Image: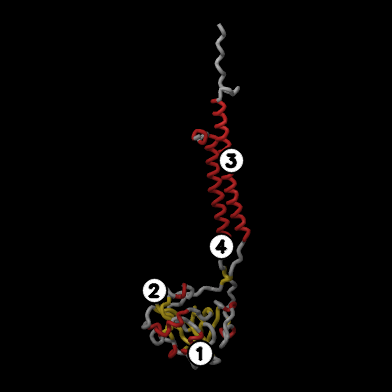
């Protein structure tokens, strides 16, 4: 059996099938990768900045189309009501906006607009609450940034255990209670630039994205390659089985004295 399996013709078949299996498996994995990548979020159109009053209102949620849009806001900061958002990193898109290492604070400062309403501004990030950069600039400022919806987590209950002047999340519902005399617009702006310039570390924020549509055709291609690989194994099995069966039949015929194709029987002795 082993000699049959190692015959040159079958060895060539073994190597061919191995090459086919490796190639078809990799081709199928490549098509699967294309399918998975097709569903990943992709950059959405990023229009020019608009005034924040066009996309936010008091008492109304911002629309999904407004999330991460570039906006501008001109007004004066209310330094007395600035808050520190605890346990944050300088990245608005980090999971939960926080990390086990590199913790610090977002500077959340109310910006009073010309109509008297307030838009919360994340001016930047500082490592400690005593950082000199927490000082709020005076006078009129113009902020450019990206609009974000209120954060929705269970951490709103943790704000009560934080020191005075600190909160756990940027929640419009909570800010209404913290700033009771203010008319607070829904959402908040993560500042990317300010005039006059700010000394704090900017908080990174991503542009808007839109969901991609899966290309199911690539998934079908992946399945086809893997089916071809299984068919190659099936054909290899049949070739090998037929080769072994044929070898056994030849060996059986060779060992059967009654087989005309086997060795000739010895001639009978003549009678005396």
- In this view, the residue farthest toward the front is 272
Q: Regarding mark 2 in the picture, which secondary structure is present there?
A: loop
Return the residue at label 2: 102
Measure the C-alpha gap from mark 2 to mark 1. Answer: 31 Å
Taking depth in this image into account, of 40 and 235 the one nearest to the observer is: 235
Asked if the residues shown at circle 1 and circle 3 are in contact, with their CB atoms under 8 angstroms apart, the answer is no
Measure the C-alpha gap from mark 1 to mark 4. Answer: 43 Å
Q: Regarding mark 1 in the picture, which secondary structure is present there?
A: strand
Quadrant hosting residue 216: bottom right
- The percent coordinates of residue 121 (x first, y second) are 49, 83
Taking depth in this image into account, of 133 and 19 the one nearest to the observer is: 19
Packing grade of label 3 (10 A; few <14, some 14-19, many >=20) is few
Taking depth in this image into account, of 32 and 119 the one nearest to the observer is: 32
Packing grade of label 4 (10 A; few <14, some 14-19, many >=20) is some
In this rendering, which labeled residue sits more in front, label 1 or label 4?
4
Answer whether residue 199 is visible to the viewer in this image. Answer: no
- The percent coordinates of residue 45 (x first, y second) are 60, 72
In this rendering, which labeled residue sits more in front, label 4 or label 3?
3
Packing grade of label 2 (10 A; few <14, some 14-19, many >=20) is few
User: Which mark is first along the chain, 1 or 2?
Assistant: 2
Return the residue at label 3: 238
Quadrant hosting residue 267: top right
| For residue 190, side relative to residue 260 (left or right) | left
Measure the C-alpha gap from mark 4 to mark 2. Answer: 31 Å
- The percent coordinates of residue 124 (x first, y second) are 45, 80
Q: Regarding mark 4 in the picture, which secondary structure is present there?
A: helix
User: Which mark is first along the chain, 2 or 4?
Assistant: 4
Measure the C-alpha gap from mark 1 to mark 3. Answer: 81 Å
Measure the C-alpha gap from mark 3 to mark 2. Answer: 62 Å
In this rendering, which labeled residue sits more in front, label 3 or label 2?
3
User: Which mark is first along the chain, 3 or 1?
Assistant: 1
Return the residue at label 4: 37
């Amino acid at each position: 059996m082993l000699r049959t399996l190692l015959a040159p013709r079958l060895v060539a078949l073994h190597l061919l099938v191995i090459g086919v299996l490796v190639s078809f498996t990799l081709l199928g994995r490549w098509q699967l990768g294309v399918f998975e990548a097709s569903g990943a979020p992709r950059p959405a159109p990023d229009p020019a900045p608009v005034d924040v009053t066009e996309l936010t209102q008091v008492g109304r949620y911002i629309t999904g189309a407004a999330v991460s849009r570039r906006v501008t806001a001109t007004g004066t900061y209310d330094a007395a009501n600035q808050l520190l958002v605890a346990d944050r990193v300088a990245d608005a898109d980090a999971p939960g906006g926080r990390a086990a290492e590199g913790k610090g604070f977002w500077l959340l400062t109310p910006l009073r607009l010309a109509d008297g309403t307030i838009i919360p501004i994340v001016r930047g990030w500082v490592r400690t609450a005593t950082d000199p950069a927490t000082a709020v600039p005076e006078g009129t400022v113009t902020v450019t940034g990206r609009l974000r919806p209120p954060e929705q987590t269970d951490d709103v209950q943790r704000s009560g255990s934080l020191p005075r002047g600190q909160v756990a999340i940027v929640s419009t519902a909570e800010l209404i209670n913290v700033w009771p005399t203010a008319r607070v617009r829904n959402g908040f702006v993560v500042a990317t630039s300010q005039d006059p310039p700010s000394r704090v570390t900017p908080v990174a924020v991503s542009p808007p994205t839109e969901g991609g549509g899966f290309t199911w055709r690539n998934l079908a291609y992946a399945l086809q390659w893997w089916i071809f690989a299984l068919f190659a194994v099936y054909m290899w099995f049949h070739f090998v089985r037929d080769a072994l069966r044929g070898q056994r039949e030849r060996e059986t015929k060779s060992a059967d004295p009654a087989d005309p194709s086997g060795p000739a029987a010895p001639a009978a002795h003549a009678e005396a």
